[in-house]
Amino acid sequence: MLTLFPDLDLDFTFHPVSNPAPRRFTPAQIEEYNREGYIPRVPLFSGHRLTRMQAFFRGNKERIVHHGSGFECFHHSVPELYDIATDKAIVERVNDLIGPDVVCHISQFICKEPGGGGPDVAWHQDSSFNPGHARCVVVWLAVEDADIANGCMWFQPRSHLRGQLDFDEKHRVAGAEEMGEKVAIETPAGHAVFFSDLLLHNSPMNRSERPRPGFTMTYVPADVQIHKNKDRWAVLCSGVDRKGLWPRHGRPGAG
């Protein structure tokens, strides 16, 4: 199948970023995003910020992992995750890629435990999950060092230019292994990779003796309509919701 939402007229074309004056990324990084579909190893958290971030994830696994059969986001309900999703270092870089008005509408914490921890994620595009146009920027934040041994992300550069690819009931893209070059995105703790929701990616099991925790945040321009779950998890991270498409969740506990 090409979409889970055949009743929606969705655009799965990659629209290159046109930003002559980015604030955080360099013009070369913008060009890299357009050409390859991602910007790797972006430094976001270091020093005390990194230490605090790591301590939170190490101490709150049970609180922020969904244990049922469905999918759940927590950035709208857990203050510490809200603070990460709206962090200036992240959001201003997202602004460089999709504009000033930005909503975080999906997040997920996955920790691949040592010694064969999974899941062994097949090649897929995040756009296949989203009931909206393919305009999202996905930010994968390494909580600890992520490398080949402990199950880092792998990308297929330039696959975002193919548009939406055929996938099965588990969102696995048919024939992805033969489609092109594969690159391991080894990422130091506190760094992130920014990538298009159309980019093919996967991650194998953790076969090391170290955990591989990572926090994923998905951002979309506020003027893009999402037709499912928008009222549950949407956080306006910057700018304004000019079309009134998104219910607003403020910082949890802020009154």
Image (tube, helix red, strand yellow):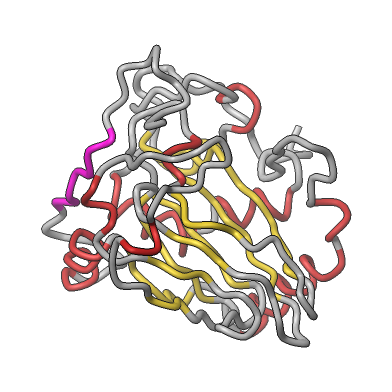
Residue at the image position 78 percent from the left and 72 percent from the top: 113
Q: Where residue 208 sits in the image (x, y, percent)?
A: 72, 86
Residue nearest the viewer, comparing 11 with 92: 11
Horizontal side, residue 178 vs residue 187: left or right: left
Q: Is residue 21 found inside the magenta-colored segment of the image?
A: no
Q: Which image quarter: residue 25?
A: bottom left
Residue at the image position 78 percent from the left and 87 percent from the top: 209
Which residues make up the magenta segment?
12-18
Residue nearest the viewer, comparing 97 with 70: 70
Residue at the image position 39 percent from the left and 73 percent from the top: 40
Q: Where residue 37 sits in the image (x, y, percent)?
A: 29, 60
Residue nearest the viewer, comparing 80 with 230: 230
Q: Where residue 179 sits in the image (x, y, percent)?
A: 30, 61
Which image quadrant: the C terminus?
top right
Residue at the image position 34 percent from the left and 30 percent from the top: 133
Which image quadrant: the N terminus?
top left
Horizontal side, residue 208 vs residue 68: left or right: left
Q: Is residue 126 above or below residue 221?
A: below
Q: Is residue 211 above or below residue 229?
A: below
Q: Where residue 160 sits in the image (x, y, percent)?
A: 28, 52
Task: Tally the numbered discs.
Answer: 0
Main SS of the magenta segment?
loop
Q: Is residue 183 above or below residue 217?
A: below
